[in-house]
Image (cartoon, helix red, strand yellow):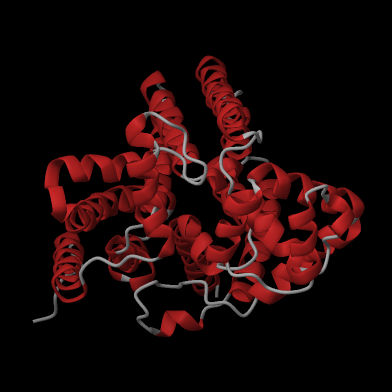
Amino acid sequence: MKARLTDKWIYILAIVNALLMIILVGYSTNYDSMSYIKAWDESWSKGIIDEFRTPIYPCFLGLMKLIAGKYFLTATMIVQYIIFIISIRYFQKIASGMINSHIVVWWMTLLYAVLPSTSTWANYILTETFALTGIVFLFYNLLVFKHKMNILSVIWITFWLAFLIFLRPAFLYLIPAIAIAWILYLKDNKKCAIYGLIGVALVGILELGYCAKFKERHGVFATSSVSTINDTYTALQYGLMDESYTNNPEYKKFIKEHNGTIVDVPSMVSYMEQYGLNTMNDAVKKSKNSHLVDWSLITIKHFKEASSFSLLHTGAGIFTLTNLITFKHLYFFLFVYFIVLLIKTIKTRKLSKISIILWTTGVGNLLLIMIGAQNAWDRLILPSIPLFMIMFGQAFNYIQLRRDTLRVGY
């Protein structure tokens, strides 16, 4: 007998997948994982702002240490899988609110639940699972607000925005994206939209306050040293550094030896410890001021280089046919989605608010990682994968409806 498309199968498969990955693969760590553990042990557990990592994930690891002791990494992995499985229901609710076809919603939810590129990151002691599920929870509350227009949704949206911003500094693009969302809703519910904008402003003020405290501790107005490390890596890679950008004799020598070469991130961190965050940050700022055009061209180069990267990347090293979907497919899809959205808006004279917010958020993520990261774009785009899946489901449903309409017309 053919299995019915019931929701329970999604959760059964997701739980089986999680158990297999937990038992057969276990937790995995890399250089970044160690930096989060170190951030808790050496900084956040002592109430000190860490130079490298913002507070959410190190403090989560600290909580797991308190609960599970020496087994805290295994406990972290299990909790990450539990949170991911919980998020499946909320992803499904978003899909149901934006896609008319139950079958399309079911398949999109199943893919979200079991694809290695979404599910298996829970094995890693990294922020990826929280980034992925946090976006789902944020957009679920945006959808709830669309229907209920209540203050509680505004509070939850502000909470998830703050959570994501302090999970990863790279989520900065969410501040303008959510601000645009509230501006779009001003006509529908002015009072709630204004409260929402106040919430965005409060998160922005918290971020600025954090940067000020970071400067107090580490000498640079930033959320972490990661952006300086990434920018220095890029400047050296493309030969955009110069000895004149620093007064530090040792760093002058370093620039002379490494300008035009690739220095791996662990080495870059050790060099930062040697020469100081201020020294490296000042030099890379001078590089940007002296090579404005070159730095702009680097972003274009990143788009070209990333075009062949797999969009549905997994850290577990599992190959599926979805690995054949690349960034160049994403570029094309986002362009077509925008054009169709524009045509639909002009024809109906109505704004598809949630669709606009989805597109704005996804494009914001894409632009930020191309500007700020030197590689690993396939991993850094991960938080927007659920959004792209919803958008693809919408597009598939739209094509299906158009085809059915043509058939009826014929």
As drawn, the residue found furthest toward the left would be 1
Picture coordinates of residue 107, whole percent (x, y): 32, 68
Residue pictured at 62% horizontal, 37% vertical: 222
Using residue 186 as the reference point, say whether residue 388 is left or right of it.
left
Taking depth in this image into account, of 336 and 202 the one nearest to the observer is 202
Asked whether residue 291 appears in the rendered view, the answer is yes
Residue pictured at 70% horizontal, 54% vertical: 343
As drawn, the residue found furthest toward the top would be 191
Residue pictured at 64% horizontal, 33% vertical: 219
Using residue 8 as the reference point, say whether residue 105 is left or right of it.
right
Picture coordinates of residue 128, whole percent (x, y): 40, 56
Taking depth in this image into account, of 349 and 380 the one nearest to the observer is 380
Asked whether residue 100 appears in the rendered view, the answer is no
Using residue 89 as the reference point, say whether residue 169 is left or right of it.
right
Picture coordinates of residue 37, whole percent (x, y): 34, 50
The vertical placement of 214 against 397, above or below, is above
The vertical placement of 216 against 327, above or below, is above
Taking depth in this image into account, of 359 and 129 the one nearest to the observer is 129
Residue pictured at 60% horizontal, 46% vertical: 356
Locate the N terminus and report the quarter of the image it occupies.
Answer: bottom left
Which image quadrant for residue 178? top right
Q: How many labels sit on residues?
A: 0
Picture coordinates of residue 281, whole percent (x, y): 71, 46
Locate the C terminus and report the quarter of the image it occupies.
Answer: bottom right
Using residue 299 as the reference point, say whether residue 381 is left or right of it.
left
Taking depth in this image into account, of 237 and 372 the one nearest to the observer is 237
